[in-house]
Image (cartoon, rainbow, N blue to C red):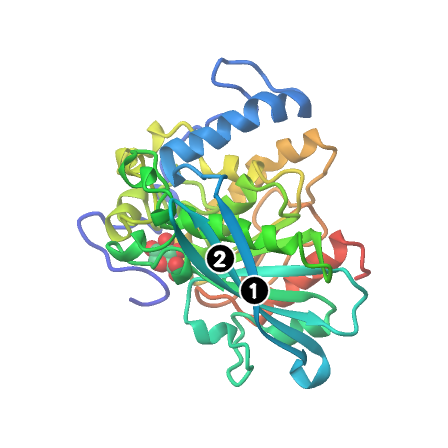
C-alpha cells in the first residue's frame, strides 16, 4: 500500500482518469414521476422527501426519529480547563427505547471568553478515543480543541463505538438494540446510520444547553465518519453546517465514476455500514436511483465543506469535487451562488467563500490542523464573524 493506493486484485481499483466510464447522473431536479423541479417549494415538498427515502431505502437505511426518553447527566465539569480558557463539560446522553438504552459520552469544551451562546463543531470520532482526550494530556490534530477554543468556537466529540461498534458482528450492540426491527429489514439502519443518529441526539442535547447556539452546529466527520456527518446533515436539518472530510465512496464522491473505491469493495470490506439493499449495486452503480451529488444537495441551503487529500486517490478527489458541482443547482434554488471553479482547484487552494466549499490538501488520508484551520475560516465567513 503506497501513496494511499489500495492493493490491486481481481476487482482492481481504477486510478486512471482515462478509464472512467461515460456515465449519466440521475437528475437531481427531476422527480421520479418526471416533473421538473423549478423552485424550492417543489424541492422541499416533493423532491427532497423523495430523495431522503431513496437514500434510506437503497443505501444508509431508515433513520428512526422516535425514542421513549432521553436523559442528560453532566458527569464531569471543569470551569477552568485549558489553563482557564475553556469550560469542560462531559455529558452522558442516555437514550431509552424498547426497554433498553444507549449511553453516548459527549466531550464538550466551551470557550470562556466568547459571548454566549456560542457556535459549536461536533466531531463524529471514528478513530482512537485518545484523539478527543478531555484531560488534554494527549493532543491530536484530528480534534485540535485548543485551536477551536482560541478561535471562539466550542468543540465537541462523540465516539462511534458508543453507537455502533465498527465491526461486522458487534455493530448491533448499540443503537440497533433500541430499534430491533431495523436488524431484519432490507432497508434497515446499520452502523453509519447509527452514527448519524447519535449526532442528532447530541443536537437534542445542544438545544437544552444555554451556552451553545443550537442554530450554529457544524457536524464534522472524517472518512467513514464523514460519510456519517453527510448523512446526518441530510437527515437532520437542525445542523447548520456540514463538514465531510475525505469521505470518498458512499460519502461525498460520485459512485458512477467507479474511480478508487467502489461499492462492491466497500460492501465486501464493511458489510455492516450500509443496508442490505445496497449490496444490489455491487458492480452495478448505474442501477442506483441516486448518486452522491444528491446527498450533498439534501444539505442545501446550508453551508457544506468537502475535502480531499492529494495522495488519497482511493477517496476520488475529482469525483468529490464533481459531486459538489452537480449539487450547485439546488443551492441556486435558494439564491445561494456557489463560487466553486469549473474544474477542481489546485492542491492547497481552498475555496471557502461559497456555500459549497472544497479543498484538496497535500498529503495523506487524514484530518489535520490544516483542514480544521480552513473549517474555522469557513464558519467565520458564513457566520459573519469576520475573516
Ligand atoms: C477504508 C474504506 C473507506 C473509508 C476509510 C476510512 O479505506 O475503504 O471507505 O472512508 O477506510 O474510514 O478511513
Secondary element at tag 2: strand
**Quadrant observed for ligand 1 in the rendered image:** bottom left
In the rendered structure, find residue 287 and report the number of the disc placed on it: none
Q: Is residue 384 left or right of residue 176?
A: right
The percent position of residue 163, horizontal first and vertical second, equals 41, 56
Residue 232 appears in the rendering: yes
The percent position of residue 47, horizontal first and vertical second, equals 55, 24
Precedes in sequence: disc 2 or disc 1: 1
Distance from Cα at disc 2 to Cα at disc 1: 8 Å
Identify the residue at image location x=68%, y=75%. Answer: 87
Around disc 2, counting alpha carbons within 10 Å, would you say few (fewer than 14), some (14 to 19), or many (20 or more)?
Answer: some
Looking at mark 2, is its residue's CB closer than 8 Å to ligand 1? no
In the rendered structure, find residue 73 and report the number of the disc placed on it: 1
Q: Is residue 3 left or right of residue 222?
A: left
Identify the residue at image location x=37%, y=33%. Answer: 58
Secondary element at tag 1: strand
Around disc 1, counting alpha carbons within 10 Å, would you say few (fewer than 14), some (14 to 19), or many (20 or more)?
Answer: few
In the rendered structure, find residue 94 and report the number of the disc placed on it: 2
Looking at mark 1, is its residue's CB closer than 8 Å to ligand 1? no
Q: Is residue 300 left or right of residue 284?
A: right
Identify the residue at image location x=68%, y=45%. Answer: 355
- Give the quarter of the image for residue 346: bottom right
| Residue placed most toward the observer, 360 or 280 | 280
| The N terminus sits in image quarter | bottom left
Q: Are marks 2 and 1 in contact (CB under 8 Å)?
A: yes
| Residue placed most toward the observer, 294 or 272 | 272
Q: Is residue 100 above or below residue 325?
A: below
Amino acid at each position: 500500500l503506497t501513496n494511499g493506493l489500495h492493493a490491486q486484485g481481481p476487482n482492481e481499483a481504477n486510478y486512471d482518469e482515462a478509464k472512467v466510464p461515460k456515465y449519466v447522473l440521475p437528475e437531481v431536479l427531476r422527480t421520479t414521476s418526471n416533473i421538473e423541479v423549478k423552485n424550492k417549494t417543489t424541492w422541499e415538498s416533493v423532491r427532497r422527501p423523495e430523495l431522503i427515502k431513496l437514500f434510506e431505502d437503497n443505501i444508509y437505511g431508515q433513520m428512526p426519529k422516535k425514542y421513549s426518553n432521553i436523559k442528560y447527566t453532566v458527569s464531569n465539569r471543569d470551569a477552568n480547563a485549558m489553563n482557564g480558557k475553556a469550560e469542560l463539560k462531559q455529558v452522558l446522553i442516555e437514550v431509552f427505547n424498547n426497554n433498553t438504552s444507549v449511553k453516548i459520552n459527549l466531550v464538550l469544551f466551551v470557550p470562556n471568553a466568547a459571548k454566549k451562546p456560542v457556535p459549536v463543531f461536533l466531531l463524529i470520532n471514528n478513530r482512537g478515543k485518545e484523539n478527543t482526550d478531555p484531560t488534554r494530556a494527549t493532543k491530536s490534530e484530528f480534534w485540535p480543541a485548543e485551536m477551536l477554543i482560541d478561535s471562539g468556537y466550542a468543540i465537541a466529540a462523540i465516539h462511534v463505538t458508543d453507537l455502533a461498534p465498527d465491526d461486522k458482528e458487534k455493530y448491533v450492540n448499540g443503537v440497533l438494540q433500541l430499534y430491533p426491527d431495523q436488524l431484519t429489514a432490507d432497508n434497515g439502519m446499520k452502523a453509519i446510520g447509527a452514527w448519524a443518529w447519535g449526532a442528532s441526539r447530541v443536537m437534542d442535547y445542544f438545544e437544552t444547553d444555554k451556552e451553545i447556539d443550537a442554530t450554529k452546529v457544524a457536524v464534522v466527520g472524517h472518512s467513514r465518519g464523514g460519510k456519517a456527518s453527510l448523512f446526518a446533515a441530510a437527515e437532520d436539518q437542525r445542523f447548520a453546517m456540514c463538514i465531510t472530510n475525505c469521505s470518498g465512496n458512499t460519502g461525498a464522491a460520485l459512485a458512477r465514476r467507479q474511480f478508487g473505491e467502489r461499492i462492491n469493495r466497500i460492501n465486501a470490506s464493511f458489510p455492516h455500514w450500509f443496508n442490505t439493499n445496497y449490496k444490489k449495486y455491487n458492480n452495478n452503480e448505474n442501477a442506483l436511483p441516486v448518486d452522491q451529488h444528491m446527498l450533498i444537495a439534501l444539505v442545501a441551503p446550508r453551508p457544506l465543506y468537502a475535502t480531499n487529500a492529494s495522495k488519497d486517490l482511493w477517496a476520488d478527489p475529482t469525483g468529490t469535487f464533481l459531486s459538489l458541482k452537480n449539487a450547485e443547482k439546488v443551492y441556486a434554488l435558494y439564491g445561494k451562488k456557489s463560487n466553486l471553479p469549473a474544474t477542481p482547484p489546485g492542491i492547497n487552494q481552498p475555496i471557502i467563500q461559497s456555500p459549497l466549499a472544497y479543498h484538496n490538501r497535500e498529503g495523506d488520508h487524514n484530518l489535520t490542523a490544516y483542514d480544521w484551520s480552513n473549517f474555522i475560516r469557513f464558519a467565520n465567513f458564513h457566520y459573519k464573524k469576520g475573516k
